[in-house]
Amino acid sequence: MSSDDLDRRLVELLVEDGRRAYTEMAAIVGVSEATVRTRVSRLTSSGILRIVALCNPLTLGHQSVRLMLSVQGLRPRQVARSLASNPMIGHVSLTSGAHDIYLEATARDLTQLVELLDELRRTPGVTTIDQYVLTRLYKDYSWNGLRDQSGQRAVGGSAGSAGATGAVTTQTGAIRQTDAAGSNGRPGHGSPTTDTRL
């Protein structure tokens, strides 16, 4: 197994279960636990890999919304940076096409969602907002596109499901890190940050 193939396989195993023990992964791929620990540490420290806990906010009664913003008068990246500090917003990215910025946000309830929308309307540079409130979530955090000719060849992954106990993203994802190199030979065993993106 080449270096790239080993990294890809380790990512695939962590996508299936972000809390999988290094000893179990080592047995599956046929290398030592130390090798697995070193590889996962390198992947996380380089920013290629992050391990997080996910939840489905709709099952908790929260409001989950996707927003497309258009910007004038300021650079979109400047506006995007300012929006990234909002704790209700879990994903911020620049886009091409009719809109400049794509957001994913979660609010506790409808009242808090209205507050978020009011705040976005007051944000300097934001001219229009298209909003899409999710009514049911069937799938999120799917990384099948990172495999083979469909996406990145250096590191790949397989589908994760909403509400999973752990999930992994590669550098194409935008998500917060919990404790990537946890104790007891298991990644993600630390004090996780709250992540209500899903």
Image (spheres, grey):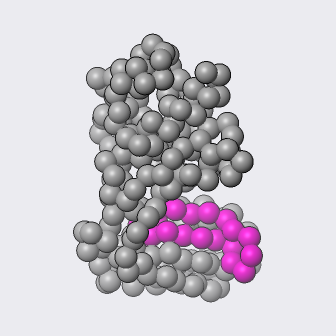
Quarter of the figure with the C terminus = bottom left
Quarter of the figure with the N terminus = top right
Left or right of 30 on screen, residue 112 = left
- Residue in the image at 57% along x and 85% along y: 130
- Residue in the image at 45% along x and 13% along y: 32
Of residues 12 and 135, the one drawn nearer to the viewer in this rendering: 12
Name which quarter of the figure residue 190 lies in.
Answer: top left
- Residue in the image at 37% along x and 41% along y: 17
Vertically, is 62 above or below 183? Answer: below
Vertically, is 41 above or below 56? Answer: above
Count of number-bearing discs: 0
Left or right of 90 on screen, residue 174 = right
The part of the chain drawn in magenta is 86-105
**The stretch drawn in magenta includes residue 99:** yes
Name which quarter of the figure residue 189 lies in.
Answer: top left
Vertically, is 6 above or below 84? Answer: above
Horizontal and vertical percent position of residue 110: 32, 83
Of residues 87 and 5, the one drawn nearer to the viewer in this rendering: 5
Left or right of 44 on screen, residue 76 = right
Horizontal and vertical percent position of residue 109: 29, 78
Horizontal and vertical percent position of residue 10: 50, 31
Specify whether residue 47 is in view: no
Specify whether residue 81 is in view: yes
- Residue in the image at 74% along x and 76% along y: 97
Horizontal and vertical percent position of residue 138: 40, 69
